[in-house]
Amino acid sequence: MRKGQISIRNSIEDVLCPFTDWYCTQGADGRFSHMGSEANDIRGIKSGIHYPYFAPVDVKCVNINVKSAFVWWQSINQVRLADGSIDYVTFLCGHDNTIDYSIGKILKQGEQIGNMGDAGNATGVHCHIEVGRGKQDSWVKNQYGVYCIPNQIPLEKVFFMNDTNILLGIADWKYLDDILIEDNRKEYLNISDLADTWKIYPIDKVPVKGNECGMLRPSKFGGLSYVIKGYPQNNVALIETRDFGLVQIYIGKDVSQLFNITNQPIYNLAT
Ligand SMILES: [Zn+2]
């Protein structure tokens, strides 16, 4: 994935691959330290570089093992895996030298979640990554004495590889188009033509006064309808606009007479 990339379909986040480059130096069941584990060690195109990686979905830090530099990130919501299943998942990432947050830290899909590193038991700069189904916050020792996240999933069943350059690592990789979604739960935000203007906010900022990135003009167009791509927080919707791309929009109770949400667009669909 790229920094800032978001993929939400039918209000469910797709699990994107956290890396821009996928250069696997040790795969699942690797003899060096992954025996019986689905873990992969991933570096970038050049060795030794502390490349950033990004939140595959909205996540919350639930555990940090400081000694080994391992961090557990639980998905906030049920998310769509690359095998099409929908569930909570937990990402376990290792060797970041720059852990500067604590348990409880929340990151949105696409925000930087860490840097490849060599903290803990690592021989070169990389990210050790494994994924467990469900809400995990621990690891268990397997029959080879290797610590693994419970309910491990093979990574090709987890990550959609869109916008990840696969440099080294053969698997049956999946892309978003491999899992087609029927849009049977589409919701539309309809903004009344009684509203002259309506502020919108970028997806990487808190949607409050001062952070606006533009203005919709519902009255000018006789009302506007948008497909709702998600709800990042209470009273805030994600919509795709023609001029500003994906943005956040405030839809609180105090303005509820000026909009509604339906399964069919009421006004001109503005995408
Ligand atoms: Zn590893």
Image: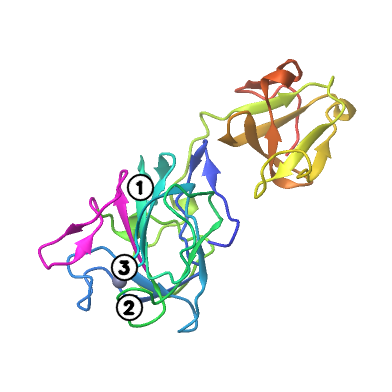
Q: What scheme was used to colour the molecule? A: rainbow
Q: CA distance from mark 1 to mark 2?
A: 25 Å
Mark 2: give few (<14), some (14-19) or many (20+) Cα within 10 Å: some
Quadrant where the image shows the C terminus: top right
Residue that badge 2 annotates: 122
Q: Decide if ligand 1 comes within 8 Å of the CB at mark 2.
A: yes
- For numbered disc 3, what is the local secondary structure? loop
Residue that badge 3 annotates: 67
Mark 1: give few (<14), some (14-19) or many (20+) Cα within 10 Å: many
- Left or right: residue 45 versus residue 231 is left
Q: Nearer the viewer, residue 208 or 151?
A: 208
- For numbered disc 2, what is the local secondary structure? loop
Q: Nearer the viewer, mark 3 or mark 2?
A: 3
Mark number for residue 65?
A: none
Location of ligand 1 given as a quarter of the image: bottom left
- Left or right: residue 196 versus residue 103 is right
Residue that badge 1 annotates: 89
- For numbered disc 1, what is the local secondary structure? strand
Mark 3: give few (<14), some (14-19) or many (20+) Cα within 10 Å: few
- At label 2, the amino acid type is Ala
Asked if residue 137 lies in the magenta stretch, the reply is yes
- Left or right: residue 177 versus residue 169 is right
- Left or right: residue 194 versus residue 57 is right
Q: CA distance from mark 3 to mark 2?
A: 12 Å
Above or below, 49 relative to 197 = below
Magenta stretch, residue numbers: 128-151
Q: CA distance from mark 1 to mark 3?
A: 24 Å
Residue at 79%, 36% in the rendered image: 199
